[in-house]
Amino acid sequence: MTDTNDDIKLAQALQEQFDRPDFGFAVEPITTCPHIPNSIATQVFIDTPCQSCNEPKENWQCLTCDHTVLCSRYRNGHMLDHFEKNKDHAVCLSYSDLSVWCFVCENYIVNEALDNLKHAAYMAKFGEEPPQASTLVVQDNQGAGSSSCAAGGSGSSSSNKQ
Ligand SMILES: [Zn+2]
Ligand SMILES: [Zn+2]
Ligand SMILES: [Zn+2]
């Protein structure tokens, strides 16, 4: 039971790092959505303007199509149009904040099936790895090595088993 809760909390914490607070409204992300396509492309087209109106910003990528990039409902709403015409194309990725939205569930989705795509989108948008993965590993290695070598033998070994 607690493991599941921790997983959800971790997923939400990761999601909050992707979600920008200026997006304007807070919705609790859901962790399961039956509309996520079985195979999700890991390729993103982050510089592609809306394929209907050439809107350069606030575009979404349909996760059901191979390569469909359309603008948000706050621009000309072409991704919403796309969903209205193709009701099974419900899940899409925001190029603004790298969140994944389902039009049917009307909710953001946090699911590990989306991690590869989000990672690819982050790399495409920022040109580098997402910050939490690399910095955590580096800090862990340095901290364990230096402190236990220097002060391990003499007095304060109660907190460190080695
Ligand atoms: Zn859904
Ligand atoms: Zn458009
Ligand atoms: Zn589509």
Image (cartoon, rainbow, N blue to C red):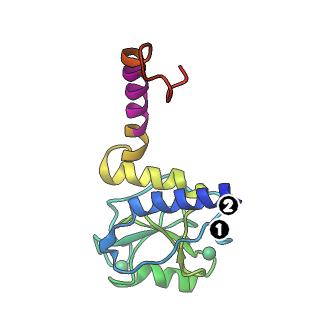
Name the spot of residue 124 as percent of width and height, x first: 36, 51
Relative depth, front residue between 146 and 112: 146
**Amino acid type at image mark 2:** Asn
Q: Residue at x 35, y 84 (%)?
A: 76
Numbered badge on residue 38 = 2
Name the spot of residue 98 as percent of width and height, x first: 41, 63
Name the spot of residue 80 as percent of width and height, x first: 47, 83
Q: Residues within 10 Å of mark 2 (few under 14, many from 20)?
A: few
In reply to whether residue 118 is colored magenta, the answer given is no
**Amino acid type at image mark 1:** Thr
Q: CA distance from mark 1 to mark 2?
A: 13 Å
Magenta-highlighted stretch: main secondary structure? helix
Q: Quadrant of ligand 2?
A: bottom left
The earlier-in-sequence mark between 1 and 2 is 1
Q: Residue at x 54, y 61 (%)?
A: 9
Relative depth, front residue between 159 and 54: 159
Relative depth, front residue between 17 and 73: 17
Disc 2 element: loop
In reply to whether residue 139 is colored magenta, the answer given is yes
Tell us which disc is closer to us: 1 or 2. 1
Disc 1 element: loop
Label 1 CB-ligand 1 distance < 8 A? no
Q: Residues within 10 Å of mark 1 (few under 14, many from 20)?
A: few
Residue 32, picture quadrant? bottom right
Residue that carries the numbered disc 1 in the rendered image: 32
Q: Residue at x 42, y 19 (%)?
A: 155
Tell me how many marks there are: 2
69 vs 148: above or below:
below
Magenta range is 136-147
Relative depth, front residue between 79 and 143: 143
